[in-house]
Image: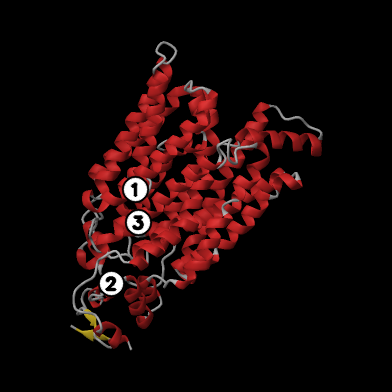
Amino acid sequence: MAEELLVENDGKTSAHLTKSLLAVAFLASFGSSMLYGYNLAVVNSPAEYIKDFYNETMIENYDWTPDERHLTVLYSLTVSIFAIGGMTGALLVGRLVTRFGRKGTLVRTTMLVFIGGALMGFSRTCRMPVMVICGRFITGVHSGISLSAVPMYLSEIAPKSLRGFLGLVPSIHICLGVFIAQVLGLHELLGKEEHWPLLLSLVVFPTMVQLMLLPWFPESPRYLLIEKGNVHATIAALKWYRAKGNIQAEVEEMQEEQRSLSSIQTISVRSLLMDRCVRWQVITIVVVNISMQLSGIDAIWFYTNEIFKNAGIPEPHIQYTTVGTGAIEVISGMLGCFTIERVGRRPLMIGGFLFMGLCCAGITVSVLLQAQLTFMRYISVGCVVGIIAGFCIGPAGVPFLITAELFKQSHRPAAYTVAGCLNWLSNFTIGFVFPFLEMATGPYCYLIFCAICLGVAIYTIFVIPETKSKTFMEISQMFAAKNNILEEELTPNGHLKLAIMNGYGTLGEK
């Protein structure tokens, strides 16, 4: 059967974008990545209503009237507990994707969204603020898992020439989720006091679509072959995702990677951190994942309305200005997605972070001068838009993509665990600390973000190689010199003759 599946193809390697690839990229991102973006921004519009709810229930349940500082702490906890849930999910993702597969993990974890959405949706009826906080935490766990599982899944099903394009599809959906949250948060729609629980709980609908359709798509071929050893399922999955063409070359490349592993077992986080063969890859994912959150983008997403208010934008115009920034996010995300295979990963990262750094400095200057120059408030808004655009073009999606590209199959789940934990820890730090940082330093807090953006741009220039159209094995070899590893050390079984897959799906000596 395996022979028939291979022989049917016409001998040409297929690297075209098929309907199956596009459909699975959309479904995996629609019910997962989009929810991450939605949950980042959805608490922005109803912030005052949520604080009022907390105030009312504290008086009702405990006969205690909290002051403004206590309400700020409770609201900051509501915002940032999502990141604590995300970090918890990131800690789990390595084991889940190894046990259930990439697609299997996405399907199984949809239940978390239904639980979290129900808690938030009924919190006002039950008069229990803890339900909002718990619901945010549970949806955060789902996002922590899916934020790693989705790019891992898409990078493994994509041909190398399309890996960048498919790898940035989730980032478009993150931007789309932010935009949808901003639109639905308008006062004319669900931005009214009685509707904020519904606004928070709408996450269940995209997940329902994903749960109904995603199970019909195959698992990652690399997972099926390298980790499960299921040749027939691997070939069937490749045929599903590829147009007519020669899939044997792709299977052979997977087998070459499998033979380069000292063990097909997924390594632990501790083993990853101790492995000198991937030292610079680990340092790279640490730098890019921390910096993408500490660049200031989360402060913009979480507290957009407050930032525009401080910039002097009239109160009635703030919500529409915020929606406008959301539209810029979607356009910028699409621009990055459609140009990444032309310009490469490094230019998008470098350009995005440099532009964000300049815009962060611009916010500081414009806020300081707006008392003397009224037009500076519009410069401030322009800089906020610039930060968002710069982020969505490159830094929003490239770190997740290169986390998959820099590691081979055995190291990838542990790498995503490390990257995810650092990403979410940084997210929590900004979400919880930013209001107090802004109180203490005023507009000078954006200079901190500026320094971080410029620092990671410099790191990218000197350390991170271009991975466009490279196989996972080629990328590992590009880091060999930096890690001071000989090529034969990189492939423990290199002294053996390279085996290939013959037409029957068995191994033969070359």
Q: Nearer the viewer, mark 2 or mark 3?
A: 2
The residue at the point 49 percent across, 43 percent down is 427
In what quadrant of the picture does the C terminus appear? bottom left
Residue 260 drawn at (x, y percent) = 28, 71
Q: Which residue is mark 1?
A: 334
Residue type for callout 3: Gly
Foreground pick, 448 / 123: 123
Left or right for 415, reference 125: left
Residue 68 drawn at (x, y percent) = 66, 27
In what quadrant of the picture does the N terminus appear? bottom left
Label 3 packing within 10 angstroms: few (<14), some (14-19), many (20+): many
Disc 1 + disc 2, Cβ < 8 Å: no
Label 2 packing within 10 angstroms: few (<14), some (14-19), many (20+): some
**Of callouts 1 and 2, the N-terminal one:** 2
Q: Which residue is mark 3?
A: 167
Q: Which residue is mark 2?
A: 243
The residue at the point 43 percent across, 51 percent down is 173
Label 1 to label 2: alpha-carbon separation: 24 Å
Left or right for 392, reference 78: left
Residue 160 drawn at (x, y percent) = 26, 63
Residue type for callout 2: Ala
Secondary structure beneath disc 2?
loop
Secondary structure beneath disc 3?
helix
The answer to which image quadrant residue 56 occupies is top right
Task: Work out whether 319 lies above or below 169.
Answer: above
Residue 64 drawn at (x, y percent) = 78, 32
